[in-house]
Amino acid sequence: MNAKIFSVDIGTTSLKAAIIDGEGKVLAYSVNVLPRKTTSFLALEWVNAFWTCARACLDEFRLSQGSDAYPDAICISGNGPTVVSENGRTLLWSHSVQTDTKTDFEKGDNTSVSKKTSVCKSIPVSQSLFIPRLKAFQFLFPDDYTASRYLFACPEFLVFTLTGVAVSVLPEERFRAAYWDEASLKENGLDEEKMPPFVPLGFCAGETDFFGRKIPVFCGGPDFISALIGTATLFPGKICDRAGSSEGINLCCEKAVFEEGVRTLPSVIPGLWNLSVLIPKSGSLIREFKNEINDIEKKKNSYDEIIDYSYNDKNSEGFRLLSEISDNVKNGINLLKKIALENDLPFDDYMTSCGGQAKNERWLSEKALRTGIDIAVLDCADGELLGNAVIANVSLGNFKSIQEGAQSLVKRVHTYRHNKKRATDVKIYKMPENLSAIIFDIDSTLYTNSAYAFEQVDVQIRHFAQKSGLSDRDARNKISEWRRDWSRKNGGKKISLGNTLVHFGVTIEESIKMRENLLFPEQFLSIDNRLIQLIARLREKYSLICVTNNPVLPARKTLSALGIAELIPDIIGLDTCKKSKPNKDVFILAAQMMNVPFQNILSIGDRFDMDLAIPLEMGMGAALVSGVSGVYDLCEKLLEG
């Protein structure tokens, strides 16, 4: 049977829903953003969001399936360990119960943090994920606790609202320790009768009236479990990156391994386990940055625009943030790989990404390059929704097991390669017929080191921030936005940091001193023997000079760190003529110092606007390189010629 499942997942910041067919294809999709300012009764908003998404999905579904079409079943998952009372009072999983105060919660602000009236003395240390939350709920909301017949986890509250049946979903019997039992409830002064009975994953709680038709409602349980199912992370060695408001790197394995920094829980598949490295707030940080930029620009940039904005300016706060998130993911992957190697466990050569962060091609591509692992994406990026479709289909009898259902519905549609080859590392715009001299840019041309490329600019921004009384973050945003605005007003051209800082009152002389005192390339770079050999051979045929926007001193230190300082003794820096690229005068001076006509010179750099546009206007040759690998290739071609 090709069952159509109305799949719903309650996230921290939004409720997502889709109608998914028996082949895993999304036939309709809707998302409803949840309110953020007042979250004390957020569960009531889940109900409103459910029906809003249901109406939208049903309307879209009927466009392709007919005006009287209905989905065959509903399956619901949600965040956790969230606790909800029968009246909708909500203690979200993400709210700290160690530092938040009773007074703050009574005001309806679940997100504030205070050191007054600490709750922590009431919170037990427990293997259970729920006992501490239940105890906190009892302390914070005693009236709601007493009055409520039941206390629910997140998706179970919505299931109860739709069917009137109170249940607690236990994904697999080994999860009982992570939930509760009679003894742990009694030990912590919690009422056992308030806890609905445990039911298995995929339990049919009953039916609900879905716009005129009774439809069965199945229990999907925790979103974490549904996402593992929806990415088929149910077989030893499978890895997934569940990336929403927070992020988790998950490895399915045959052995329970307990190590610091890793959360070990049973898999939903008996006999298997799931190892997780959690990265809190990664998606939330991106959203906060997006809101900051939108406030600065007085416009609503999309998520995709913010990602492009960040990667197009590698010294923006956005680039720093995305790099930090990617590095945290890389560290998580490396930790799990280390555990796998030490315990003779399989470890795939790719991971599947799901969640909100799995919907941007550039982010995934850059993330794969930085983390060093291939990243696969699915036909349905919301793994929780696809997992719910699997669960419901198994309960309807369409598959014999969760694993069989996942193998059938979960389809990989694209893989972003961590070692992606560029179409070319060199783009030659013009090659002089009688080449006799070469101008090299230095930074990100004669070396490839993203950490130093970022730091050499960011250290100046941090220094500017300190002098201006700004936070580092505000200074990055201020400078990045000004450069972006300048580019918009100047036909897409780019402006150097030195010229940007002049706008903010930092003179070129101050920039020179700042860079001389703050840049230490030797801490990031090392001897490059291949570059040494190529430059040594190149200087036998051509005159060589470096033109850089850094002062001569740090430029010379950079060449020394690479081992080529004696091979290219001539450098034109910011302090040479108090001007920076793309100023024409620095290229004129380079030609004069080499005593070579413009038409016989080749300019090589990693930025078209800074390194190549003016030389081309002057009649020089120009070659754009993607870093030192491009320099290698170009040098070898020139030597062969």
Image (tube, rainbow, N blue to C red):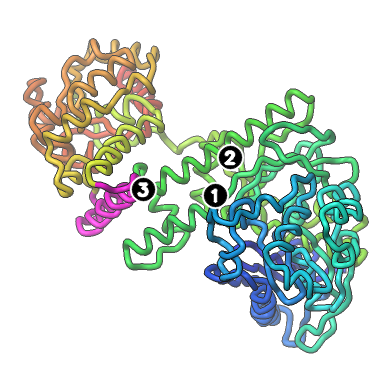
Quadrant, the C terminus: top left
What amino acid does circle 2 point to?
A: Val
Label at residue 473: 3
Residue in front for this viewpoint, 628 or 127:
127
Residue 4 at x, y percent in the picture: 79, 71
Is residue 431 in the magenta section? no
Q: Earlier in the sequence, mark 2 or mark 3?
A: 2
Q: Which of the numbered marks, if any, corresponds to residue 282? A: 1
Image position, residue 199 (x, y; %): 90, 62
Question: In which quadrant of the rendered view does residue 253 lie?
Answer: top right
> In the rendered view, does 619 fall on the left or right side of 258?
left
Quadrant of the frame with the N terminus: bottom right
> What range is drawn magenta here?
469-493
Can residue 78 be seen here? The reply is: no
Q: Which residue does the image show at 52% across and 69% down from the upper left? A: 37
Amino acid carrying label 1: it is: Ser
Earlier residue among tags 1 and 3? 1
Distance, label 1 to label 2, CA atoms, is: 10 Å
- Mark toward the viewer: 1 or 3: 3
State which tag comes first along the sequence, 1 or 2. Answer: 1
How crowded pointer 1 is (Cα within 10 Å; few <14, some 14-19, many 20+) is rated as many
On whether residue 474 falls in the magenta region, the answer is yes
Q: Position of residue 593 (x, y in %)?
A: 8, 21
- Say which quarter of the image contains residue 446: top left
Q: Amino acid at mark 3?
A: Arg
Which residue is painted at 88% across and 72% down in the image? Answer: 205
Q: Are marks 1 and 2 in contact (CB under 8 Å)?
A: yes
Q: Residue furthest bottom?
A: 212
Residues packed near mark 3 inside 10 Å, few (<14), some (14 to 19) or many (20 plus): some
Mark carried by residue 329? 2
Q: Secondary structure at mark 1?
A: helix
